[in-house]
Image (spheres, grey):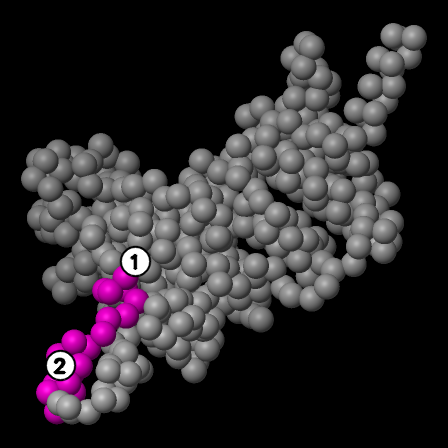
Amino acid sequence: MSCCGSSPGYDDLDEVSRLVSARLAAFLRTLRDAGFRVGLAEGQDAATLMSAGYAARPGLLRAAFKHLFSARKSDWDKFDGLFDAFWLGKRVRSRSRTIGSTPGTNNPSLKSLQDMTAEQGGGQSVADQLPSSDDAPEGRSGEGRMEGGLARRQSRRGRFQKAQ
Amino acid sequence: MKGRNEIAQALAASGYIADTDLATAISLMQLLRRPLLLEGEAGVGKTEVAKALANVHATELIRLQCYEGLDQSSALYEWNYQRQLLSIQAHRGADSIEDRLFSEKYLLERPLLAAIRRARAPVLLIDEIDRADDEFEAFLLELLSDFQVSIPELGTIPAVTIPHVVLTSNGTRELSDALRRRCLYHYVDYPDVDRETRIILARVAGASPSLSLQIARMVEGVRKEELRKVPGVAETLDWAAALVGLDISDLHDAPETVHDTLICLLKTHEDRARVTPEVTQRLLGKVA
């Protein structure tokens, strides 16, 4: 039910759009892992929102995504925590797993989202608020904290090198 | 497209005090052309959202009240059998009458068909969808996906305009994932003290700001008691109107009247018995 018109192919996108798309796709996967029933239509509408200027206003984006992706009270109650953990790197009480996300600290389209953390955190930097690896239970690295695609790739590479 | 602040202001002008979350949901309805599913306890103001939205858009509100056993003939269309019979009698012997019996002339529009055939997009309120059967919910999917309906005798009827669709549910039955996924979701909770105060001020003529605040605080306290039926916003407004009608300007001045009028909030015998004069006094003590 998103807006009509032909959308560009993945190869036609510039780097920023690709990063945003990749990050959005990772967020959708995170939501699915958390039990949300998220389909392609919701993904399309989420992309519509991001390109409609919502990405520049994190508070508004969170509210909009919450309406779009929640389907029941249980979704509604846990959405804010998942959003904050994924996009803002905040701690959440409930355990969530974010996978496949790309590092976006230098991405201007995503920076505004992270700037909100600094604003809300009274001047703390994003890095200051990122959960430490101490939060993750042993043997379950990545759960309960942000886990970037790069970190996962490095982790896999390390395991591969050990195996060799 | 209106921004959420403009929408919140427009709703307020219609007497509905919305939080920014709800205003965001309404702005998304327009942007994404999705229906809005409002879920929450009875009496929190879900139906009022649709009424206020119709005011904001200066358009018609078409309401479909759902109930167990609701079928397509009550929701979509019916043939006017009486008129068809009269026509058959009037044109007895004419060959062509059969062809004309199932035409627009004999079609009775019900809320869903009416909503997609208006020249100006109306607000379509599908109220208490959880009371309808699974079969009806499945039928709604076609309408909410494609905004067209199929009438066997007439073919497919596409929407002239896309209505602003609001569905409400009290959660008495679990709705299907398919229906939920087609909608934007908003959970309507009981208002906080600040919002409830503003609602009273907007809706009850003669209620002063200080009395409205006291009432909102008192109601908040009542809701925290273990009750069978937690009072909703409608009950708060009834109670506020009763107090204003009794010339009460400060709850502390008339504790007995406050207790007696709590029947506006407490709708079961059990709840009434639970909130004794002592409980009322305790709750009043927390109201500044």
Q: Earlier in the sequence, mark 1 or mark 2?
A: 2
Mark 1 highlights which residue? B127
Q: Left or right: where does residue B247 sit relative to residue B131?
A: left
- Res. B247 in view: no
Camera-nearest residue between B21 and B210? B21
Q: Is residue B74 found inside the magenta-colored segment of the image?
A: yes
Q: Quadrant of the N terminus of chain B?
A: bottom right
Mark 2 highlights which residue? B85
Please rate how many residues cluster around mark 1, counting C-alpha atoms within 10 Å: few if below 14, some from 14 to 19, many from 20: many
Q: Secondary structure at mark 2?
A: helix
- Res. B166 in view: yes
- Rendered position, A91 above or below B50: above
Give the residue at x 24% y 65%.
B73
Give the residue at x 39% y 43%.
B176
Q: Residue A93 falls in which quadrant of the image?
A: top right
**Tag 1 near tag 2, CB within 8 Å:** no
Residue B140 image position (x, y, % from top left): 37, 57
The secondary structure making up most of the magenta span is helix
Disc 2 residue type (three-letter): Leu
Camera-nearest residue between B47 and B173? B173
Give the residue at x 64% y 53%.
A44
Range covered by the magenta-colored residues:
B72-90
- Rendered position, B107 above or below A12: below
Q: Left or right: where does residue B5 sit relative to residue B114?
A: right
Please rate how many residues cluster around mark 2, counting C-alpha atoms within 10 Å: few if below 14, some from 14 to 19, many from 20: few
Camera-nearest residue between B141 and A62? B141
Disc 1 residue type (three-letter): Asp
Q: Secondary structure at mark 1?
A: strand
Q: What numbered label is drawn on residue B228?
A: none
- Rendered position, B49 above or below B44: below
- Rendered position, B202 above or below A97: below
Residue B283 image position (x, y, % from top left): 23, 39
